[in-house]
């Protein structure tokens, strides 16, 4: 059986302690609690000493990552477009610089397998290089798990 891994990245407009990012930072705990309570949530990456992954900066000081596992594309989609998370999405241009390349990638992992940031980076690179495939895809072009 497979579960859905997802990575999304964002380039911060300012350091996290900047006043313009306060609405984003202050919403993190609630948004993460909503994710963990959402039907179909399985796991999310958490940094050292935080309840989020904002201290993990594998691709530069201005780039934050979110890596999680869900039961299905539908479960993740339901959470992403639920009111609480959708409100943060509406404000993203205030917090993050626009990105010209793909910044969200989805792929299937075995039950109980937690993806690494290195694997997630490889999947994002695959998507950017080859477009959506069974190994790296998007909400707009999902693939079924290969069993």
Image (tube, grey):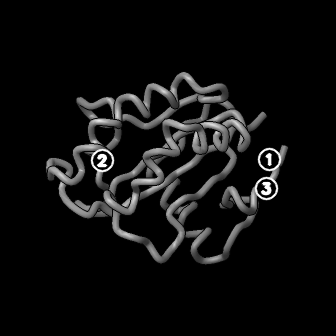
Q: Nearer the viewer, residue 130 or 74?
A: 74
User: Furthest-top residue in view?
Assistant: 37
Q: Position of residue 112 (x, y in %)?
A: 62, 29
Tell me whether circle 1 and circle 3 mark residues in contact (CB < 8 Å): yes
Identify the element where label 3 is drawn.
loop
Q: Residue at x 57, y 73 (%)?
A: 128
Q: Quadrant of residue 70?
A: top right
Mark seen at residue 56: 2
Instruction: Count residues near mark 2 (Cα–Cα under 10 Å), then give few for <14, some for 14-19, many for 20+.
Output: some
Position of the C terminus by quadrant: top right
Above-or-below relation of 84 to 144: above
Instruction: Count residues near mark 3 (Cα–Cα under 10 Å), then give few for <14, some for 14-19, many for 20+.
Output: some
Tell which circle, 2 or 3, labels the residue nearer the N-terminal end.
Answer: 2
Identify the element where label 2 is drawn.
loop
Task: Tell me: 119 left or right of 22.
Answer: right
Q: Residue at x 59, y 28 (%)?
A: 42
Identify the element where label 1 is drawn.
loop
Q: Position of residue 124 (x, y in %)?
A: 54, 64
Instruction: Count residues near mark 1 (Cα–Cα under 10 Å), then give few for <14, some for 14-19, many for 20+.
Output: some
Above-or-below relation of 25 to 126: above
Above-or-below relation of 118 to 43: below
What residue sits right under mark 1 in the picture? 145
Q: Residue at x 55, y 38 (%)?
A: 83
Q: Position of residue 51 (x, y in %)?
A: 32, 29
Position of the N terminus by quadrant: top right
What residue sits right under mark 3 in the picture? 143
Cα–Cα span, label 1 and label 2: 29 Å
Q: Nearer the viewer, residue 19 or 59?
A: 19
Tell which circle, 1 or 2, labels the residue nearer the N-terminal end.
Answer: 2
């Amino acid at each position: 059986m497979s579960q859905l891994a997802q990575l999304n990245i964002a380039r911060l407009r300012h350091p996290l302690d900047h006043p313009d990012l306060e609405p984003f930072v202050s919403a993190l705990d609630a948004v993460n609690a909503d994710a963990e309570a959402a039907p179909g949530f399985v796991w999310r990456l958490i940094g050292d000493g935080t309840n989020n992954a904002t201290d993990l900066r594998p691709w530069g000081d201005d780039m934050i990552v979110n890596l999680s596992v869900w039961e299905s594309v539908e479960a993740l989609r339901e959470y992403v477009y639920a009111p609480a998370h959708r409100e943060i999405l509406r404000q993203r241009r205030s917090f993050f610089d626009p990105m010209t390349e793909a910044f969200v990638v989805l792929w299937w992992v075995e039950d109980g397998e937690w993806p690494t940031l290195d694997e997630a980076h490889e999947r994002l690179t695959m998507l950017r290089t080859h477009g959506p495939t069974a190994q790296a895809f998007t909400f707009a072009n999902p693939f079924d798990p290969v069993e």
